[in-house]
Image (cartoon, helix red, strand yellow):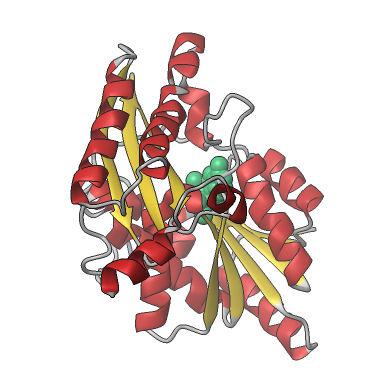
Amino acid sequence: MQVIDRVDGFRKELDAARVAGRTVGLVPTMGYLHEGHASLIRRSAAECDVTAVTVFVNPLQFGAHEDLASYPRDLDRDVAIAEDAGAVLVFAPAVEEMYPGGPVLTSIHVAAVSEGMEGASRPGHFDGVATVVAKLFAIAGPCRAYFGEKDYQQLAVVRRMAADLSLPVDVFGCPIVREADGLAMSSRNVYLSPEQRAAATVLHRALEAGAAGLAHSTDLAHSTDLAHSSDVMAAVVASESLVHLDYAEVIETDHEYRLLIAARVGKTRLIDNLGVAKFFDAGSEASGSISTESRLRRDAD
Ligand code: AMP
């Protein structure tokens, strides 16, 4: 395992790997790694010859009153977890190495995708994310890059940026890894007191309740169903006095509904999401449900 803190050194390693005919997998993180990060690293290690993990708490993506200073850090532990999961390189630059001239004058803004939800609650956040990820992609060069669906809107922002700018990086999304009681793993979970930790499971419970409403909807989900589903999520969160809802939304894509939630538990802000496939499986067809696909066809006739 090699730990590199210089931009040039990291770029040279990955260039050399490609010259030697090896494929590169990149897993960008802010460190304080957990099993969610490890799942991304394992996937990269399974699909690529060389897996590099980046550990960088990027100041650009934190708002003035957010937790940049207190964000948990433990590089030795991160290196051990990354190595165990199959990484051979960790790139952990200092802020001065990434932004040697002080504040950046160049910023990447991915319109539309960055709006609403996290974009609305954290102004400037996605510009900071897009800018640092573009920089990491520029340093790493052609590779496959792995991101978690935990940060669903971030994944959409990164995908769109890579496509719009023709960056030589294939972006892959990986499923959310949860604790046994449903709480999505997050480096920020260490902020929670035992009472807050117990209360925080309400995010996942709210998503499940909202998803159940959609899945049992007998008609093609219309905007009223989606609004009802977000009301259900909000009501579940309201039952937990330690948790304050930021937003509960449902969006529709080609193949699924995606329920997204954000809430504050004390000073800690948590996010989570859940996908509901539009196409029911054979089992539910057999039990009498009509698939959304066939409903869509029927409605189109
Ligand atoms: P972070 O260190 O929080 O910036 O996360 C780095 C990467 O790990 C991002 O692509 C996250 O979406 C992903 N990630 C964080 N938590 C999880 C999780 N519980 N399951 C899957 N991926 C995750």
- Residue 12 pos. (x, y %): 66, 79
The one of 146 and 26 positioned closer to us in this rendering: 146
Q: Please give the name of the residue rendered at 61% of the width and 78% of the height, measured from the top-left corner.
A: 143
From where the camera sits, is residue 132 visible?
Answer: no
Residue 9 falls left or right of residue 70: right
User: With 76 as the anchor, is 67 left or right in this view?
Assistant: left
Find residue 62 and report its horizontal and vertical position in percent.
32, 46
Picture coordinates of residue 126, whole percent (x, y): 30, 58
Give coordinates of residue 78: x percent, y percent: 67, 44
Quarter of the figure that contains the N terminus = bottom right
Viewer-closest of 120 and 50: 120
Name the foreground residue: 157 vs 18.
Answer: 157
Please give left or right for residue 53 compared with residue 109 in the image: right
Residue at point 60%, 42% (across, down): 177
Image quarter of residue 14: bottom right
Relative to 125, does residue 301 appear above or below in the rendering? below
Q: Residue at x 72, y 50 (%)?
A: 82
| 47, above or below 76, in the image | below
Q: Is residue 201 visible?
A: yes
Image quadrant of residue 203? top left
Q: Quadrant of the C terminus?
A: bottom left
The relative height of residue 257 versus residue 88 in the rendered view (above or below) is above
Say left or right for 85 vs 231. Answer: right
